[in-house]
Image (tube, rainbow, N blue to C red):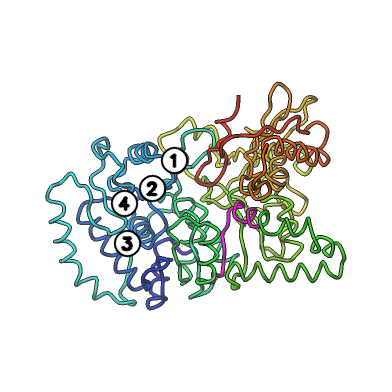
Amino acid sequence: MTAFNRLFEESIRKYWECPAFTDYGGQTLTYREAARKILLLQAIFRRREIEPGDKIALVGNNSTNWALVYLAAVTYGAVIVPILPEFHDEDVQHIVSHSESLILFATDELAARIDEERLERLRTVVSLDSLELLYYRDKHLPHEVRRIEAEEQAKIEAVTARTFSLPPDRDPEKLAALVYTSGTSGFSKGAMLPYRSLMANINFARDGMRLDMAERILSFLPLAHAYAASFDFLFPFSVGCHLTFLGQMPTPKVLIEAFAEVRPSLILFVPLIIEKLYKKRLAPLLRHGPVSVLSRLPVFSALIGKKIRKKLTATFGGNFKEIVVGGAALNEEVENFLKKIKLPITVGYGMTECGPLISYSPWFEHRAQSVGKAIPGLECRIDSPDPVRQPGEIIVRGPGVMLGYYKNREATEGVLSKDGWLRTGDLGLIDEAGFIYIKGRSKNMILGPSGQNIYPEEIESRLNVLPYVQESLVVEETGRLVALVYPDWDAVDAEREGKEDNQAWLAERMKENREAVNRNLPAYCRLAEIRLHGDAFEKTPTHKIKRYRYLT
């Protein structure tokens, strides 16, 4: 197996003059230009006595400089600490301190909100926008860095594809990335990912997802999250792809324009984007009007499906091999429809603590409502006497699994056994063919009146595609199941423009939604009430609702 540095050394040499990184709407760097910037950063690390194992924090939106800093640090032997820019300022401050980072690379906007004097170990803050120094304890540092750049520049410019090299590989068990989980139950923990974890994910993608030289990737999910870092960045860069970084909020309008321009070969989504598209544009056509009537007739159904697939394919750039959905469950109605029209879409499953991938199957093998099969090399079992029919906690072991949580022995011992089995906290089933089906989080499960297991995520998934529902959260209140619903006010306003008493009208629509959901649920998990919630639910950066905020 090729080691981490040797893999990227070979990639850079092989694709030396190919385009590597582009900031959307900005300039492009070739692999050669990226390599020379990486070497310069590493020269500064070396001359400023940054040692292998030292921590380098990185916070900002996706960009060429983000990618360069990540690669320079990890191939140098330093530990990268990627921080989601959506984290609260105090959380960023805590992570930089807790990780004992010596250098912080941050956008100018984010850096301005950091109180460096509270970070005793931090030596310097570098602008991720310009790579200029923003803060430094050593007053001689700016002069020193300019001197290093001048002395190293000529040597770096002389490097060719044949002579380019990265530092020696570190032990695969050594820490490579310290990724603080977004978490839905409190402050995040630092998952320690060794080089073997990064390589396990990259190697699986190289064998199972198949991208080729010069194929294009649009990177819009946050790279500080393990899902995007592995499959929107490290994997495609290792095979010579051209990555375009979308550094702005990926609204549907912005994404559609970017897809049309970049025409990516592989698309990573979280369910929210796909579900919004379905709910806003497709569901109304399928439920009302002539399309809904014709779609029930076999001949017209196939023709309409083909037309919708063609339109969706064009919307996503028209050049993709597959759409991979991860980060949360995809709504059943949405998934069934997309599979019916034969859109090449699949759903995978992972967690930060596995760097992240646990299971995946290509779209043409994938089974509806599953999250694929455990990836090669990963052992997976269900902690249940009957894993086919009775849900139990999903437990995994393999090269992707983390070393533990940084400076948190108690949390580590709570999920990681001495022989390497990781308790995921997710409940699931596994069928005879090995496909895994997620039922929900073990900590979210509600015990029914006669001991039945109720998974609120399944009810929420059904609710969230119904009219006038933006998002929902199912909770238990004195033995009753109550759904808190944040309405889709755009849809309400469009329907009720100029009319009065919208609250009473909306309450009646929610009563209809409750009846519609309950018709398809067992008696023990039917909703007793839908209650309107005034504000959007507070979420993690990966769009999971922070449930603990709403439990009574």
Q: Nearer the viewer, mark 3 or mark 4?
A: 4
Badge 1 is on which residue?
190
Q: Earlier in the sequence, mark 1 or mark 3?
A: 3
Q: Are marks 1 and 3 in contact (CB under 8 Å)?
A: no
Rendered image: mark on residue 105: 4
Badge 2 is on which residue?
81
| Residue in the foreground of this view, choosing between 322 and 411 | 322
Label 1 SS: strand
Q: Residue at x 57, y 53 (%)?
A: 357
Q: Earlier in the sequence, mark 4 or mark 1?
A: 4
| Residue in the foreground of this view, choosing between 177 and 171 | 177
Q: CA distance from mark 2 to mark 1?
A: 9 Å
Badge 3 is on which residue?
167
Look at label 2 and name its amino acid: Val
Outermost residue toward the top in this view: 478
Q: Give the crowd class for mark 1: few <14, some 14-19, many >=20 residues within 10 Å.
A: many
Label 3 SS: loop
Q: Magenta part of the protein: which range?
A: 263-277
Q: Residue at x 20, y 56 (%)?
A: 47
Q: CA distance from mark 3 to mark 4?
A: 21 Å
Q: CA distance from mark 2 to mark 3?
A: 20 Å
Residue 5 position, x and y percent, is 39, 62
